[in-house]
Image (cartoon, helix red, strand yellow):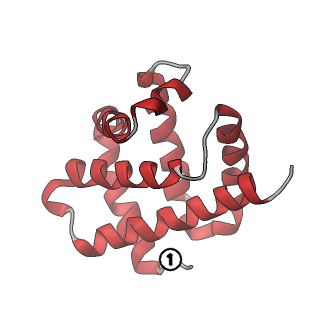
Amino acid sequence: MSISQRQKQLVQESFAKVEPISEQAADIFYTTLFEYDPSLKSLFKNSIKSQGQKLMATLKVAVNSLDDIDALVPVLQKLAERHVNYGVKPEHFTLVGNALLYTLKKGLGSDWNSELRQAWIDVFKVVATVMKNHAFNTKH
């Protein structure tokens, strides 16, 4: 599983376009996620607005770190540990990935295309794989 230089560039450029509307994007994301599975609301103890700020900040770190995946891995592993403590299960990653793709499609409008979609899918797969492998396949 790897991410090409072109995919990194596409993800970074597209995220830069979403960042100015981060509050709206976070709202779309959580609205969509809870439509997919309303039971996930119970995992969130903070306000969705503050959670959205955390989401966008975390996405920014991940997107900006794509050129050095090795440095990103420990960050993702710590994130995975926190999410397990919140009650996240492996199957939730698919819902999150789908909600993220929908959010990006809505936020990017006519800039969204199949190449960009695939780039985000591949990036999310790498992130999710690192997190799931650490959280659910190892003992800390």
Tell me which corner region of the image, top left, top right, bottom left or bottom right, holds residue 25.
Answer: top left
Q: Residue at x 37, y 34 (%)?
A: 34
- From the image, tell me which residue sits under label 1: 3
Q: Judge by depth and name the residue closer to the eye, 101 or 56.
A: 101
Residue 58 is at least partly visible in this image: yes
Disc 1 on helix, strand or loop? loop
Q: Residue at x 68, y 41 (%)?
A: 84
Image location of residue 46, percent across then percent down: 53, 19
Image location of residue 95, percent across then percent down: 43, 49
Q: Residue at x 71, y 35 (%)?
A: 85
Residue 102 position (above or below residue 110): above
Tell me which corner region of the image, top left, top right, bottom left or bottom right, holds residue 115.
Answer: bottom left
Residue 121 position (above or below residue 3): above
Tell me which corner region of the image, top left, top right, bottom left or bottom right, holds residue 118.
Answer: bottom left
Image location of residue 44, percent across then percent down: 53, 25
Image location of residue 39, percent across then percent down: 46, 31
Q: Alpha-carbon neighbours of circle 1 within 10 Å: few (<14), some, or many (≥20)? A: some
Looking at the image, the residue that sits furthest to the left is 110
Q: Residue at x 41, y 23 (%)?
A: 49
Looking at the image, the residue that sits furthest to the right is 140
Image quadrant where one finds the N terminus = bottom right
- Looking at numbered disc 1 in the image, what kind of residue is underneath it? Ile
Q: Is residue 15 left or right of residue 91?
A: left
Q: Is residue 94 left or right of residue 135?
A: left
Number of numbered discs overlaid on the protein picture = 1
Residue 72 is at least partly visible in this image: no
Residue 89 position (above or below residue 117): above
